[in-house]
Image: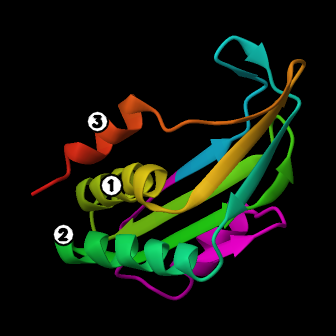
Amino acid sequence: MRVQMQDFDVSGEMAVMRAGNPAIGAITSFVGLVRDLNEGDCVSEMILEHYPGMTERSLERIVQEARARWDIIDVLVVHRIGPLRPLDQIVLVMVAGAHRGEAFSACEFVMDYLKTQAPFWKKEQTPAGGRWVDARDSDDAAAKRWQQ
């Protein structure tokens, strides 16, 4: 798990994950990007903030829960902070498993929980000024479907 300002290289991260591990039969990934439009307004920049220490612990808990639920080999979460512009990468979730089904489910779970359980805050810059992005009901609904 990494929280960082610098960009990440998806293919490089995948190469590291699969290097020398012939047990891996599937790797699934999700890459989140900054959009130039949100709630009908143009977005010129997004500033991502987090709570250092707490954020990393939250990400670790999410990954440990995914490992407990699915038979997976490896998980990577990279989340950026700081100022980002449209088309910039925000987050990478990558899961390796022996089979695609476990990897897909675990990847989706990690992303759904990351959106609702990790302490990140987004502030968008629009023509009307800066505004904090509220949590979405759809994100909460996505996370609830994983509750046991």
Which numbered disc covers residue 141? 3
Q: CA distance from mark 1 to mark 3?
A: 12 Å
Q: Name the secondary structure under disc 3.
A: helix
Give yes or no for residue 10 being in the magenta stretch: yes
Q: Name the secondary structure under disc 2.
A: helix
The quarter of the picture where residue 140 lies is top left
Residue type, mark 1 in image: Phe
The quarter of the picture where residue 13 lies is bottom right
Q: Nearer the viewer, residue 116 or 110?
A: 116
Q: Which residues are magenta?
A: 1-29
Crowdedness near tag 2: few (<14), some (14–19) or many (≥20) residues, C-alpha within 10 Å = few
- Where, quadrant-wise, is the C terminus in this rendering? bottom left
Residue drawn at point x = 28 percent, y = 36 percent: 141
Residue type, mark 2 in image: Arg
Marks 3 and 2, the one that precedes in the sequence: 2
What residue does disc 2 label? 69
Q: Most extreme residue toward the bottom, as rendered?
A: 20
The quarter of the picture where residue 43 lies is top right
Marks 2 and 1, the one that precedes in the sequence: 2
Residue 139 visible? The answer is yes
Q: Most extreme residue toward the top, as rendered?
A: 40
What residue does disc 1 label? 109
* Label 1 close to label 3 by CB (< 8 Å): no
* Label 2 close to label 1 by CB (< 8 Å): yes
Crowdedness near tag 1: few (<14), some (14–19) or many (≥20) residues, C-alpha within 10 Å = many
